[in-house]
Image (tube, rainbow, N blue to C red):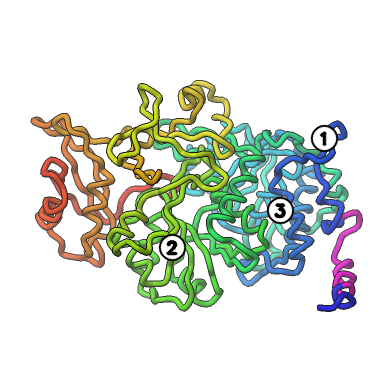
Amino acid sequence: MTVNTANKRLQSLKHHLAPNDNPHFESLRLHRRPDQVPYLSKLDPLQFLLRSAMVHAQRTAILHQGHSYTYLELSNRVRSLANVLIETYNVKPGDRVAVFCQNIPAFMDAQFAIPAIGAIIVPVNTRLAAKEVDYVLEHSESSLLIVQDELSDRLSQASRDRLAHVIRVADSEDRTQDPYEQLIAGSKNQLSWNEFPTQYDENATISINYTSGSTGKPKGVMVSYRGAYMMAIGMAIQDGLSSKTVFLWTLPMFHCNGWGFPWAIVMVGGTQVMLAKLDYTRIWKLLKEHGVTHYNGAPTVQNEICNHPDAVRLGHTIKAYSGGSALSATLIRRMNDLNLEPTQVYGLTETYGPAVTTYDVHTLDDYTEEEKYALLARPGFGIVTADEVRVLNATTYKDVKPDGKEIGEICFTGNLVMKGYYKNPEETEKSFRNGVYWSGDLAVRHADGSLEIVDRSKDVIVSGGENISSIEVESVISQLDSVNECAIVAGPDDKWGERPVAFVVVKNKSMLQAQEVVAHCRDSLAGYKCPSKVIFIDQLPRTSTGM
């Protein structure tokens, strides 16, 4: 492109910009107090959008239901929503704004618009029951809720009465019939980016993300601007994101802010394909026809994708992050056969999502196939924007020996650790001891520095004084070709105290017998680790995040 051609192209773009709004220039100089050091600015994910609205102005940012939005259009939608929140609903810095939506454009708008005016995002788990939704809205003290019509039946009258305002999202293909679309289309856009009230401190709270509440009430994890910014950079580097990325939203955006990917993909100028529901027929259609390069999901999602009737080896490699539990060697092999490249990740809501990833597959070329699969099932190493992840003895607070045998608890420090639990100082103090965050997950450390999770501290099975890792037993049973999923729990035993019990989901109505499962375990495990009982079920129970 010649200089003259480039100048003409820039001139042609100017009419797209609203008055007093020039994301190509002024809006990149955001949110600096007059008394701040001139060359320092807050680490703020909003900067990613404003830069992409300049650098990737006409590139497709969002695809959904036959509609597409360029980066310039996305930035204008975000600015419109931010103005509506201020003009119509009087939202102020520090106010909590809850979002109860599936993976749709309104959620993406909110990810940027709410912090753009200094308010705090409260993503609400779309799988929660009405009473659980009530708890999150009440505990977070949210004053406004953006809710998708499809989910509104789980919004109780008590919550409606408590909320000051509710914004409805129809998510309709006909945008003239969508109250949300009409609301932002009618925005007067009176305030420019630089006129929005904001939080100047990068350590201020950008989001409160509620845990799945597997033990007791969900806890509100406070996420900082700095942490969100660093997580986005970490995901972009680790997952190889670029302007050529086409990301399919199979992971719920409410979960750990979508592991930071809404901000990360906007940062690099990639395209995000929205997917409101896990429709596996549609997923395969999108994988085949839309040039998808990346998606994320729990092993259960990977299982369903691999076992779908439309599954076929793809003509290009698609990267797939998988977290929540360990990938079995069988599933890794099946994904590779389909040209899906899995990466085992590990993290918690308290660490912004996947703060640990497995080996780079290219470093394992000298290993046998089975050795490679075993190594790839380890979470491995902290990501580039995280501190070194440690495995500590919970009594002495010392690091365990890197011998692959001594068990300790995984601990975190650094930018990717929560600020604390919202309105819960007792749990915050309990989680932070001796200057580190204690995850509750048990692991060993190997000589090369990699981590291998052996269990949750509360899930270790103690049988006759011997510790049994449920993950180890699950991994062995999952090697059986006819096994789709497996979970090991502790069952009471009069003699040994506890014995492992296996809950198994089989593939395609397989006729697998309990004695076959036990015999397979005896070939690979010590006798005391083998399940005392095998129970076949149709589906494993999930946490509210689907993990």
Kind of residue sitting beneath label 2: His
Task: Please tell me how crowded label 2 is: few (under 14), some (14-19), or many (20+) other residues with Cα within 10 Å.
Answer: few
Is residue 511 or residue 312 the one in the foreground?
312
Tell me if 405 is positioned left or right of 500 in this view. Answer: right
Q: Amino acid at mark 3?
A: Phe
Per the image, is 131 magenta? Answer: no
The Cα–Cα distance between marks 2 and 1, rounded to whole angstroms, is: 43 Å
Camera-side mark, 2 or 1: 2
**N-term-proximal mark, 2 vs 3:** 3
Quadrant the N terminus occupies: bottom right
x%, y% of residue 410?
41, 36
Q: Is residue 460 left or right of residue 8?
A: left
The residue wearing badge 2 is: 362
Q: Which mark is residue 48?
A: 3
Q: Secondary structure at mark 3?
A: helix
Q: Quadrant of residue 463?
A: top left
**What residue is at 90 percent from the left and 70 percent from the top?**
11
Of marks 2 and 3, the one in the foreground: 2
Q: Are discs 2 and 3 less than 8 Å apart at CB?
A: no
How far is disc 2 from disc 3 in space, using C-alphas? 30 Å
Q: Which residues are magenta?
A: 7-21
Q: Is residue 447 visible?
A: yes
Taking the spot 38% from the left edge, 33% from the top edge, the residue there is 409
Sequence-earlier tag: 2 or 1: 1
Q: Identify the residue at image location x=10%, y=30%.
A: 494
Q: Quadrant of residue 512?
A: bottom left
Judging by the rendered image, the residue that carries numbered circle 1 is 37
Mark 3: give few (<14), some (14-19) or many (20+) Cα within 10 Å: many
* x, y percent for residue 434: 48, 22
In the rendered image, residue 289, in percent from the top left (x then y), is placed at 53, 77
Verify whether residue 16 appears in magenta.
Answer: yes
